[in-house]
Image: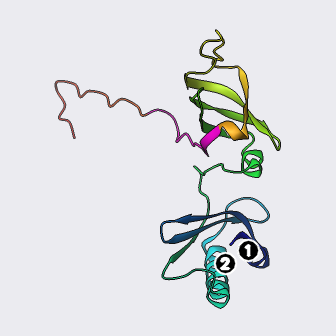
Amino acid sequence: MTALAEPIAAETGCGLYDVQWRGGTLVVLATASEGGAIGVEALSKLSRRLSAALDAADLINGRYVLEVSSPGLERSLRRPEHFAGAVGERAVIRTSGPLRQRIVGEVLEADGSAVSIRIEEISGSAGAGQGIQPGPGQTLSVPFGDIAKARTTFEWGSPPRRTPRSSPGRQGR
């Protein structure tokens, strides 16, 4: 699917972020090739061209739904290039194996083998039995093979303000 979708995305001025099969739905995630936000018109154009190419190639047996969208602010990080594109952003990483962890922090760098993250929060059994527990402010390198799931996370504004209580002489609205 990626081999089919990538050149079509490039022709329509998009970058292909990911292709996923989710129970009868082919999800194609695209970005603006020049960076920044991708527009609805570009996504519509990609959807039309990709739909025609899929029909012509007849790669999928039976019925399916084609969903073409942007990866969004809170997007999955599945490949090394996803992590490289998220440098400077806040992410949540869940690791697998005996040292299961949930790590929240800023992605500092990513290469072909691991991602480095400045820890804001960490929970789980990291370093269990070794007396080593990385903490907030420290940098942790996580090999891609140890990552079960990861996504960027967006903080919406400041914490909500408390509503002032109305004074005894005033009616609340």
What is the spatial separation of the Cα atoms under label 2 and label 1, in whole angstroms? Answer: 6 Å
Residue 165 % position (x, y): 26, 27
For the residue pair 169 and 21, the one nearer the viewer reads as 21
Q: Amino acid at mark 1?
A: Ala
Residue in the image at 59% along x and 16% along y:
128
Vertical placement of residue 111 versus 13, above or below = above
Q: Quadrant of residue 29?
A: bottom right
Vertical placement of residue 22 versus 1, above or below = above
Vertical placement of residue 95 versus 41, above or below = above
Label 1: state its secondary structure.
Answer: helix
Residue 119 % position (x, y): 65, 25
Image mark for residue 9: 1
Q: Is 112 left or right of 136, judged from the image as shown?
A: right
Label 2 sits on residue: 46
The C terminus, quarter of image: top left
Residue in the image at 72% along x and 40% along y:
144
Q: Residue furthest top?
A: 131
Q: Amino acid at mark 2?
A: Leu
Residue in the image at 64% along x and 88% along y:
52
Label 2: state its secondary structure.
Answer: helix
Label 1 CA crowd tier, 10 Å (few <14, some 14–19, many 20+): many
**Colour scheme employed for the rendering of this structure:** rainbow
Residue in the image at 55% along x and 82% along y:
61
Image mark for residue 124: none
The N terminus, quarter of image: bottom right
Q: Is residue 136 magenta?
A: no
Label 2 CA crowd tier, 10 Å (few <14, some 14–19, many 20+): many
Vertical placement of residue 167 versus 144, above or below = above
Part of the protein shown in magenta: 147-159
